Image: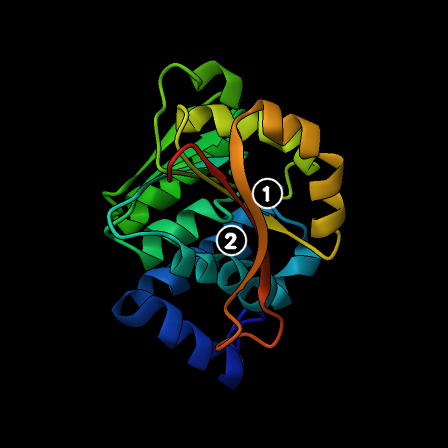
Amino acid sequence: MEEYAMTAVERAAAEQVFGERLALAERYVEHLATTGIERGLLGPREVPRLWSRHVLNCAVVTDLIDREATVADVGSGAGLPGLTFAIARPDVAVTLIEPLERRCIWLNEVIEDLELTNVRVLRGRSEQFFNEVDVDVVTARAVSALNKLANLTIPLLQGRGELLALKGRSAAEEIEKARKVLKKLGAKETEVLTAGADVLEEPTTVVRIAVGQA
């Protein structure tokens, strides 16, 4: 039995989150547990908790995303959360923004193997794409504190849309520290949400920041 195999609880959650695309999610996890570890995208200690801590933790956030939305994932790394969005929601168009070449190569290999047609990879820092990318939703996980992250993500919305930042217990504190920056960037509404409470033992904490009229 592979070290990254799902528990019964994880399988029940994965079936609900990914539905008929669960096999794709399983192949993605296999990539994470093999070449993802070998190439340093994740640490080996993460293998036993790939489903609960990483893939499911990210994928449940798609409940907060409208149908046929366009999404940019900043600092995508191993595709968390962006690739989980693309797998769980074929109606959503996802752009993965990642500065490191070796990570981009790996992401493109996974996308090709899974035959995903709703996702692309842009190599570079998010600031390089402020005039090129225009999306409904921008997301990030484990990139930086919100007061810095806002400057790296919100400009990709071109004045309207929302940032969904996957955060931990310090979410409310980060929002307070980022108030001035968020106001300057046009934030109209800021709230802390949870995603996946119906399927996960530990729901995902998400900071949602609405910009413009969205």
Can you give x and y, in whole percent of width and height, for residue 179 in the image? Answer: 69, 34
C-alpha separation, residue under disc 2 versus residue under disc 1: 8 Å
Q: Is residue 180 left or right of residue 105?
A: right
Q: Nearer the viewer, residue 161 or 2?
A: 161
Amino acid marked by disc 1 = Leu
Mark 2 — residue?
32
Q: Nearer the viewer, residue 205 or 185?
A: 185
- Residue 206 makes an appearance in the image: no
Residue 114 sits above or below residue 20 on the image: above
Q: Based on the displayed image, in which of its 4 quarters is residue 41 positioned?
A: top right
Q: Secondary structure at mark 1?
A: loop
User: Do the CB atoms of the residues marked 2 and 1 lie less than 8 Å apart?
Assistant: yes
Q: Residue at x 53, y 73 (%)?
A: 197
Identify the disc placed on residue 41.
1
Q: Residue at x 43, y 18 (%)?
A: 129
Q: Secondary structure at mark 2?
A: helix
Residue 57 sits above or below residue 118 on the image: below
Q: Is residue 128 left or right of residue 113?
A: right
Q: Based on the displayed image, in which of its 4 quarters is residue 105 positioned?
A: top left
Can you give x and y, in whole percent of width and height, for residue 40 in the image? Answer: 62, 41
Circle 1 Cα neighbour tier, 10 Å, few/some/many (<14 / 14–19 / ≥20): some
Circle 2 Cα neighbour tier, 10 Å, few/some/many (<14 / 14–19 / ≥20): many
- Residue 195 makes an appearance in the image: yes
Can you give x and y, in whole percent of width and height, for residue 32 in the image? Answer: 51, 53
Amino acid marked by disc 2 = Leu
